[in-house]
Amino acid sequence: MKVLIADDSKTMRMIVLRTLRQSGLPIDDVFEAEDGAIALAAVATFAPDLIMSDWNMPNMTGIEFLTNLRASGNQTTFGFVTSESNPAMKEQAIAGGAAFLITKPFDAERVAEVVGAVVS
Amino acid sequence: MALGTPARRMPIPEDVRDFLGDLLGKAVSVSKQPVSDLAEIDLTDEKWVTGLYMNKKDLLIGACIAELTLAANAGAALAMISQQVAKEAVESGELGENLRDNFHEVVDIVSALLNGPSVPHLRLTELVDGIPDEVIELSRCANGNKRYGVTIVGYQGGTLGLIGL
């Protein structure tokens, strides 16, 4: 499975990847993006199977990334990994086409449960 | 705080222990510590780091304060950096870019412990060295003001303080 991880924190990108691997999901290739704009530009060439994105990022936020992605017709499985979470954000994420929203902190068990349910 | 607004629920030590344990991926122990006036801390002798939590109008409504020892070690533990790097940072009196970025992430995520559905939302805007005067003032009027003694297995620990209007 090819995974695109978008987060402006290098450490969080590392932790997301580490947790994905610990969850037992088959990760073949990874692209790391430090904001939504870089991530959006990378989707066409990297062709990920799964996108895991932070919500708050410079240049292009996670929800803007998702909105632009869906507007371009791309239906890649997309989930948020964010420190901020409230019912309004969850509604916005799901309405925008996100498959899940995981709140930090998280562990491998939680990632396996949530991500495993939406990827084949 | 506006009349009728529920008081912010401050986490008990067990909440902080479980939260940091999940975040750092390591066993953490947390004890309750007495709350003293922040103005009594001699900042020329003791090094602290403060995360400023703002509301939607960019008004200071909360803070996370940490002894440099805790900030350096939590920042190291988050990214599995050796305890020696944290020790060197503490000895130098500065976090350094890498540990600072990591502890910024910790403080950002810790804000979730203070947020809830019925209290004004707060978010981290800045991590600064020391304890700013406005945070000392805030601690005197905030209805939420707690201290915790935090230790991280394999690392050193220190005092963590959470303040919230």
Image (cartoon, coloured by chain):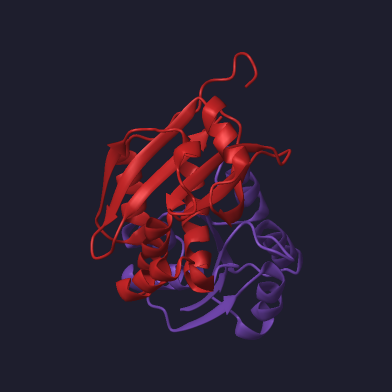
Chain colours: A purple, B red
Q: Quadrant of the N terminus of chain B?
A: top right
Looking at the image, which residue is at 46% across and 65% down? B93
Q: In the figure, A116 relative to B4: above or below?
A: below
Q: In the figure, A54 relative to B109: above or below?
A: below
Looking at the image, which residue is at 65% across and 47% down? A92
Looking at the image, which residue is at 31% across and 71% down? B83
Q: Position of residue A51 (x, y in %)?
A: 56, 69
Q: Position of residue B58 (x, y in %)?
A: 71, 41
- Residue B143 at least partly seen: yes
Nearer the observer, B38 or B156: B38
Q: Outermost residue toward the top?
A: B3
Position of residue A72 in the picture relative to residue A114 (left or right): right
Q: Quadrant of residue B155?
A: bottom left
Q: Quadrant of the C terminus of chain B?
A: top right
Across the whole image, how many numbered discs are drawn on residues? Answer: 0
Q: In the figure, B34 relative to B5: above or below?
A: below
Nearer the observer, B107 or A66: B107
Q: Position of residue B48 (x, y in %)?
A: 47, 53
- Residue A50 at least partly seen: no
Nearer the observer, B50 or B1: B50
Position of residue B14 in the picture relative to residue A35 (left or right): left
Looking at the image, which residue is at 68% across and 70% down? A74
Q: Position of residue A12 (x, y in %)?
A: 49, 67
Position of residue B114 in the picture relative to residue A24 (left or right): right
Q: In the figure, B51 relative to B79: above or below?
A: above
Nearer the observer, B86 or B27: B86
